[in-house]
Image: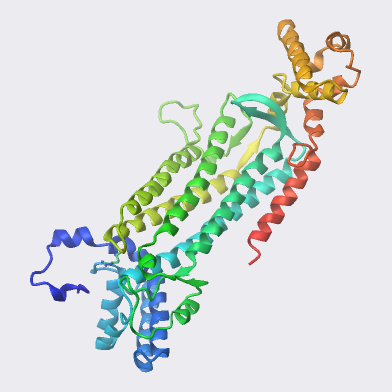
């Protein structure tokens, strides 16, 4: 049955019903919809807007319906949307009493409430996945504090860095993602129920009671805004998009670093694919797919922002479009996070290749300049002197650590014996003891700090 058909003289066309319906995707809200209805009807009973025994009967039946859905004994089908389905089923089970559930409520505030409840749970779920991922990264970092690799800018070897520092960099990004989702949670944690269709109700409802039954921290303060606000969905999608950007960058690194050209990382066979024509190929399909799926998550965000932008106050059916964006983004994000975490647990690092690459390509030239600065030379002059030394090496097919001391001294009398060890990649990494730098002590401190912040984020 349609909740609104009384006003019409003709039944709606089947094609129109098919186009209007949202049950094919909003069935996902059944849990939250029924919970919100239970809270609502309890409040209606407590405030004596409906008789207490009617409220109890409705609430008990809703609990049974939820159990039946969970057990697979009640199929969600045959209605315009999940709200209609639940009400239909309720009245099927207990007759006219069931019709009292929708007192002092509209589907407009109901759907906004369901969506907020769903989004809150989804945020907790995504953050749990992110926590697992950071823990995996911390494991890798802890096992690789002593190893070095090349650090890149412009995709050219720049300076040697610590392998652990590299993995910590992604932990930092994912920590920010958790923070962003947590912040989004605060704005999602506001209950719109009681706003009704758009203007509130003249019935003496107790919104605070419903909010506390549903564990909402706050209640909305303007009914017009409350039924039409989907900022929290857009914000959730932005959090997903930023997180996917980080995941995608990581995937790009893995794809490059696992190539024959780099050979730093090996992705386990179980998480790789082959080619149907080239027998030698081992392809990084999983990181490529994650990189690819980032596009669609951005798409859901763009779609949602565009849906919102031209809407007059208050509720408009356009808002039904929020669901597929949210559900699809959530599914994509959770899928990517869990497979990526597994893949990461199965990578192996060729630390010898990393070390060799870190030492080549004049990657310690900055150390030469810093050496001169420590001896009192202004940095710009030190930069110029070092550039001449690098030029000399290129012309004479030499490396910085294979250059004789007298050659260094021909460029500046400030050079002494210790320059020859200072230009070794290991020394270069160790010398950067600054907070956030690549020295072992700094990297260990970074690991401690990441662990501390992660624990703090999940302390309650
Ligand atoms: N399926 C609808 C949605 O998702 C529920 C709200 C319908 N409200 C209405 N006034 N037609 O937005």
Query: Observer-nearest residue: 173 or 186?
Result: 186
Q: Position of residue 119 (x, y in %)?
A: 45, 62
Residue 246 in the image, given as x and y percentages of width and height? 54, 43
- Split into quadrants, the picture shows ligand 1 in the one at bottom left
Horizontal side of 203 relative to 294 (left or right) equals: left
Residue at the extreme right of the image, as rendered:
417
Position in image of residue 456 (x %, y %) = 68, 60
User: Within the image, what quadrant is residue 99 found in?
Assistant: bottom left
Q: Quadrant of residue 52?
A: bottom left
Which quadrant is the C terminus positioned in? Answer: bottom right
Where residue 199 appears, as percent x and y from the top left, is 33, 73
- Report the residue at 39% width, 53% height from top: 328
379 sits left or right of 190 in the view: right
Seen at 73% across and 48% down, the residue is 447
Asked whether 183 or 89 is in front, the reply is 183
Height in image: 117 above or below 133? below
Measured along the vertical axis of the image, is residue 388 above or below residue 338? above
The quadrant the N terminus occupies is bottom left
Residue 381's image quarter? top right
């Amino acid at each position: 049955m349609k909740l609104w058909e009384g006003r019409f003289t003709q039944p709606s066309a089947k094609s129109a019903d098919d186009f209007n319906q949202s049950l094919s995707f909003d069935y996902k809200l059944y849990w939250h919809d029924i919970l919100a209805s239970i809270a609502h009807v309890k409040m209606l009973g407590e405030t004596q807007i409906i008789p207490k025994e009617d409220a109890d009967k409705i609430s008990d039946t809703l609990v049974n319906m939820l159990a039946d859905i969970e057990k697979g004994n009640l199929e969600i089908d045959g209605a315009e949307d999940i709200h209609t389905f639940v009400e239909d089923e309720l009245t099927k089970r207990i007759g006219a009493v069931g019709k009292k559930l929708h007192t002092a409520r509209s589907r407009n505030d109901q759907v906004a409430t369901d969506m907020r409840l769903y989004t809150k749970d989804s945020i907790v779920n995504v953050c749990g996945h992110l926590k697992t991922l950071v823990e995996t990264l911390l494991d890798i970092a802890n096992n690789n504090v002593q190893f070095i690799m090349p650090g890149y800018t412009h995709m050219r070897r720049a300076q040697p860095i610590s392998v652990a520092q590299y993995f910590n960099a992604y932990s930092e990004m994912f920590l920010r993602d958790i923070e962003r989702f947590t912040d989004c949670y605060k704005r999602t944690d506001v209950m719109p129920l009681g706003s009704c269709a758009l203007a509130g109700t003249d019935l003496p409802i107790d919104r605070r009671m419903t909010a506390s039954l549903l564990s909402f921290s706050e209640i909305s303060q303007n009914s017009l805004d409350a039924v039409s606000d989907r900022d929290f969905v857009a914000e959730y999608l932005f959090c997903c998009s930023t997180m996917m950007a980080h995941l995608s960058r990581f995937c790009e690194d893995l794809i490059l670093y696992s190539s024959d050209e780099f050979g730093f990382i090996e992705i386990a066979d179980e998480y790789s694919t082959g080619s149907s024509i080239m027998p030698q190929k081992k392809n990084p399909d999983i990181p490529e797919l994650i990189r690819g799926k980032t596009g669609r998550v951005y798409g859901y965000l763009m779609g949602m922002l565009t849906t919102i932008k031209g809407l007059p106050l208050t509720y408009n059916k356009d808002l039904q479009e929020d669901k597929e964006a949210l559900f699809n983004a959530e599914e994509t994000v959770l899928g990517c996070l869990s497979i990526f975490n597994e893949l990461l647990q199965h990578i192996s690092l060729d630390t010898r290749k990393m070390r060799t690459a870190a030492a080549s390509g004049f990657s310690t030239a900055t150390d030469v300049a810093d050496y001169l600065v420590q001896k009192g030379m202004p940095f710009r002059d030190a930069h110029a002197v070092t550039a001449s030394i690098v030029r000399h090496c290129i012309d004479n097919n030499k490396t910085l650590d294979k250059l004789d001391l007298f050659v260094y001294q021909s460029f500046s009398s400030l050079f002494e014996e210790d320059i020859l060890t200072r230009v070794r990649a290991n020394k270069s990494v160790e010398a950067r003891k600054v907070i956030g730098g690549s020295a072992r002590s700094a990297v260990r401190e970074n690991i401690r700090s990441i662990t501390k912040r992660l624990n703090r984020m999940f302390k309650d």
